[in-house]
Image (cartoon, rainbow, N blue to C red):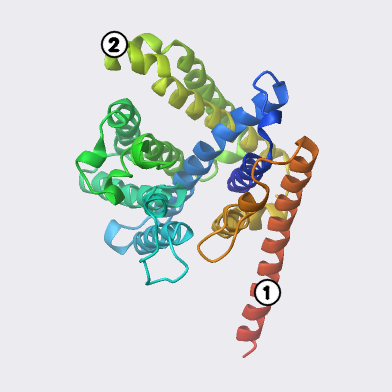
Amino acid sequence: MRAFAVLMMVQGHTVDVLLSNDHRLPDSPFFAVWLFMRGMTAPIFMFTAGTVFIYLFRLADQPFKSNPRVAKGLKRFLLLVCIGYLLRYPTSAIFDFSNVSEKSWEIFFAVDVLHLIGFGILFLICAAFIAEKLKLPDYLVFTPSALFFFLLYPLANNISWIEIFPRFIAGYFYKGTGSLFPLFPWTGYLFCGAVLGSYLAKNPAVFKTSEFSFKLFIAGLIIFSFSFFIYPAEKFLYGELAANKSYLGTIFLRTGFVLMLNAAVSYISIRINNIPRTIILIGRNTLLIYVIHLMILYGSAWNPGLNRLFEKSFDVWNTIGTALAMIISMIMMVLIVNKINNKIRLRLKNG
């Protein structure tokens, strides 16, 4: 699922950067399917991040204070947030900010997916601590936490946080400062994934059964279907304007779809004797792929991106060809890095 999510993200970003507006046709079934899947990529990525982290956290089966995943999680939090800011760093001079424009500062302080996942992991650690201290099952802490970020989203999105906090803090609460992935509602997807991760850790053999895939699919289908009937509840809770924007409807639709997709992947994995090594390596190197493909497409303070040269100027076939080339190059990069790492480990082992 991690491999699928990151490759979907690579092609999604590539197409979004290069495809001409003349070919972005809402009536085209192909573009509609692409647009739908593009909207699902981030929830898949975040759900999977929550699943993997809590799965490994609970698999350690140790008290919070002695669980090695606590320290690893905190390091991961700092790493992701730091990389997130470095990718948006406003100047190549590192310490000279005299020529940084207001627009560049806005971009720097905008919250992106790495910031979000980093803080999401921090919140998961805190939630796991609370669950242990209160002696509660994980789902009784993770599920309300997910609902907290989901249900407060319409309210948080309509508050002018920039009038309350400095820009670098306000960006974590809403999109008003240019943030792509504020805490509301996106952290909720990590907590939803955490519920599944905790269940898998406590039932380590369950994913090998068709029954698990079936139940997961049914749960996803129910949530997915519920999204189409949630309008009255949204209208009651937040008013007609928010209901018309279908904040909660979209959240439930995405959550249900992600669960159904996980069920499908789980079922397929049962039928496969061995998952290809390449897929495993891609799943383990999602951060590397994410960072490198963003630098190629969008550039950074130290390199120009393809968007500066070819932004929204390609036809359909050139865009598809470039997206495939990006995916292949990311896969080749992972294989080369793995080969180099194996050689280094072998040399260190042999002294």
What secondary structure is found at the residue carrying circle 2? helix
Q: Quadrant of the C terminus?
A: bottom right
Of 70 and 327, nearer the camera is 327
Residue 17 sits in quarter: top right
Q: Can residue 277 be seen in this view?
A: no
* Residue bearing the label numbered 2: 236
Which of the two residues, 64 or 306, is positioned nearer the viewer here? 306
**Amino acid under label 2?**
Phe
Amino acid type shown at disc 1: Ile
The image quadrant that residue 218 belongs to is top right
Quadrant occupied by the N terminus: top right
Q: Residue at x 60, y 28 (%)?
A: 36
Residue at the (56%, 26%) spot, across then down: 217
* Quadrant of the rendered image containing residue 317: top right
Question: Residue 302 at x, y = what percent?
Answer: 54, 66
Name the spot of residue 45 as percent of width and height, x first: 52, 43
Q: How far apart are marks 2 and 1 (CA)?
A: 58 Å
Residue 340 bears which disc, if any?
Answer: 1
Structural crowding at the residue carrying mark 2, measured as other residues with C-alpha within 10 Å and reported as few (<14), some (14–19) or many (≥20): few
